[in-house]
Image (cartoon, rainbow, N blue to C red):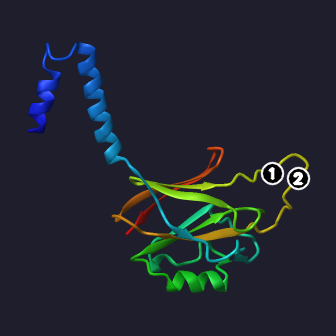
């Protein structure tokens, strides 16, 4: 029935050729938009930014650490330990309903870091406020930069590799990572 209506609309003589093209473009646009809708994900920041406990020599830790299951609760690098309060949250998290992300935030104000978390297909974008270091400011060398822990609620279907993108509210990409979320 649906295809017969489309064929009547697009038959030569019913509408001029430019109108038929516009009708097809509109139909395809609606179908594509329906397949790629964005979903705003709920998240919680249970702690203020925390610094890892490191042992000399200071280990290289990644910008993003995604923890999708209890099996993944492990230190991110040799010589690095999670603080006790982070371990408590990660160990008690219900990974069937949520997952955790730790990301490097640098020296910024607490609790006003994230603008939103949005999923579109197999891509999750975390938009952060831009706290770039301006002229006249500096970072003290050797300072352990803090991480922010967020717990993201799983809604919808997961069970696939997800591409995580961290970007500023100015659309600058800060970091990207792929991770399987069960």
Question: Seen in the image, is 85 located left or right of residue 142?
Answer: left
Q: Are marks 2 and 1 in contact (CB under 8 Å)?
A: yes
- What is the quadrant of the N terminus in the image? top left
Q: Residues within 10 Å of mark 2 (few under 14, many from 20)?
A: few
- What is the quadrant of the C terminus in the image? bottom left
Query: Extreme right residue here?
Result: 136
Task: Determine the image quadrant of residue 158.
Answer: bottom left
Q: Residue at x 74, y 62 (%)?
A: 106
In this rendering, the count of numbered labels is 2
Q: Residue at x 23, y 20 (%)?
A: 20
Secondary structure beneath dot 2 equals loop
Task: Determine the image quadrant of residue 95.
Answer: bottom left
- Across and down, in percent, residue 131 comes to 75, 54
What is the CA distance from the residue labelled 2 to the residue labelled 1? 6 Å
Identify the residue position indicated by label 2 in the image.
Answer: 137
Give residue 54's mark: none
- Across and down, in percent, residue 54 comes to 72, 76
Q: Residue at x 12, y 27 (%)?
A: 7
Q: Residue at x 73, y 68 (%)?
A: 110
Q: Is residue 55 above or below residue 136?
A: below
Task: Determine the image quadrant of residue 74.
Answer: bottom right
Identify the residue position indicated by label 1 in the image.
Answer: 133
- Across and down, in percent, residue 176 comes to 55, 53
Q: Residues within 10 Å of mark 1 (few under 14, many from 20)?
A: few
């Amino acid at each position: 029935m649906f295809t017969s209506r489309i064929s009547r609309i697009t038959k030569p003589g019913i509408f001029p050729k430019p109108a038929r093209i516009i009708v097809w473009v509109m139909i395809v646009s609606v179908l594509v938009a329906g397949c790629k809708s964005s979903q705003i994900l709920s998240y919680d920041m249970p702690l203020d930014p925390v610094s890892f406990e490191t042992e000399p020599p200071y280990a290289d830790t990644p910008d993003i650490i995604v923890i999708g299951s209890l099996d993944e609760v492990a230190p991110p690098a040799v010589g690095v330990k999670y603080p006790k309060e982070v371990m408590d949250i990660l160990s008690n998290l219900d990974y069937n309903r949520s997952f955790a992300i730790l990301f490097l935030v640098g020296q910024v104000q607490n609790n006003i870091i994230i603008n939103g978390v949005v999923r579109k297909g197999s891509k999750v974008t975390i938009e952060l406020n831009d706290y770039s270091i301006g002229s006249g400011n500096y970072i003290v060398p050797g300072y352990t930069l803090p991480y922010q822990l967020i717990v993201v609620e799983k809604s919808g279907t997961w069970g696939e590799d997800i591409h995580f993108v961290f970007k500023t509210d100015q659309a600058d990409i800060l970091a990207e990572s792929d991770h399987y979320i069960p």
